[in-house]
Image: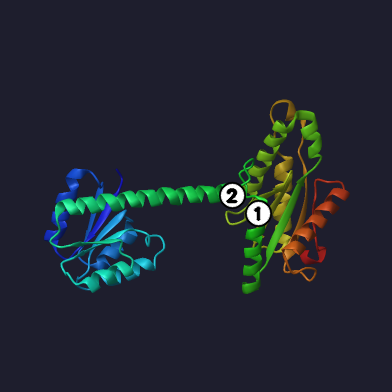
Amino acid sequence: MADSVLIIDDSEAVRDKIIKTLEPLDLFARFYQAEDGLEGFKKLMASPVDIILCDLEMPRMDGFKFLGMLKTRPEVSDTPVIILTGNEDRELKIKGLDQGACDFLTKPFDPEELVARMRVHLKIKHLQDDLKRTNELLLELSNTDHLTGLFNRRFLIEALDKELQRARRKDGMVSLIMIDLDHFKRINDSYGHMQGDVVLQKVALQLQKELRNYDVAARYGGEEFVAILPDTCLKEAYMVADRIRLSIQGMHLAGPMAVERITASLGVSVYPSPHYEDIDGLLRSADEALYQAKERGRNQVVVSDPAGMT
């Protein structure tokens, strides 16, 4: 098993007894030790663990302060903490539980009780980890277009809203590129929808290659894609859009579609703009520019406001 435990106690004898009790059971692959809360917190940040045994009364930093620091770090704040205390004061135990500990164990502890409590809280931790992974997967699935692996339209709108809010706060800008494949219906009609799906997947890969890791690429619907470019002016966005256009044009298809050349028309808009103030305006402006690219012969990039290119 890959589970690990951190034992924080100012008594070396107590730490040794805990390790000797747990080691033969193969519950943990790694044991970490600390003499007080400060040392324990440093070790935890360097090597996150699955469960913590923490004494309440220690020099420099006691268990209460350790629990308080744990809350400030989201990456470790969910780690279960079992309080170790030789103090029978009921109020102290309640205070520890209120501050985030999941259980307590009175010293001198009974080895069988220690093992039983560790097993219970490890099981709970594993169940919580599984639930967290499942929720993350469900969230990813709800945000992802199943065919291309890009974000879907719902996530795009949420991301665009956040970027516009950030641009307003920081007096920044965000650009949007709308991409539509040219004559894609002919591909579907000539080769079938399965081959059309292959084209869409290849376009999605080309789109991701041309964007930065913090840009957002989404499938907007059908053969239409959208890219959000934070902190990008209209001129820079035009250059990115043209790289995307050339990348799609340069795709090589296999089998019967090898004779085909896929092209795309692209429209680019930017926020802020004197012509619109919201997401709908930004999308509409890019869509209008895209329509102009189609009208002008396809396989080209048109910006919504040519004056913004200067």
Mark 2: few/some/many CA within 10 Å (<14, 14-19, 20+):
some
Q: Position of residue 295 (x, y in %)?
A: 88, 50
Mark 1: few/some/many CA within 10 Å (<14, 14-19, 20+):
some
Q: Nearer the viewer, residue 133 or 209?
A: 133
Q: Compared to 131, does 269 lie above or below?
A: below
Q: Earlier in the sequence, mark 2 or mark 1?
A: 2
Q: Nearer the viewer, residue 14 or 180?
A: 14
Give the residue at x 72% y 39%. Answer: 250
Is the residue under label 1 in contact with that under label 2 (CB below 8 Å)? yes
- Left or right of 264? Residue 228 is left
- Left or right of 162? Residue 114 is left
**Residue bearing the label numbered 1:** 154
Give the residue at x 74% y 44%. Answer: 222
> Which quarter of the rendering shows the C terminus?
bottom right
- Left or right of 284? Residue 143 is left
- Mark 1 residue element: helix
> Which quarter of the rendering shows the N terminus?
top left
Question: Residue 63 sits in which quadrant?
Answer: bottom left
Q: Amino acid at mark 1?
A: Arg
**Residue bearing the label numbered 2:** 142
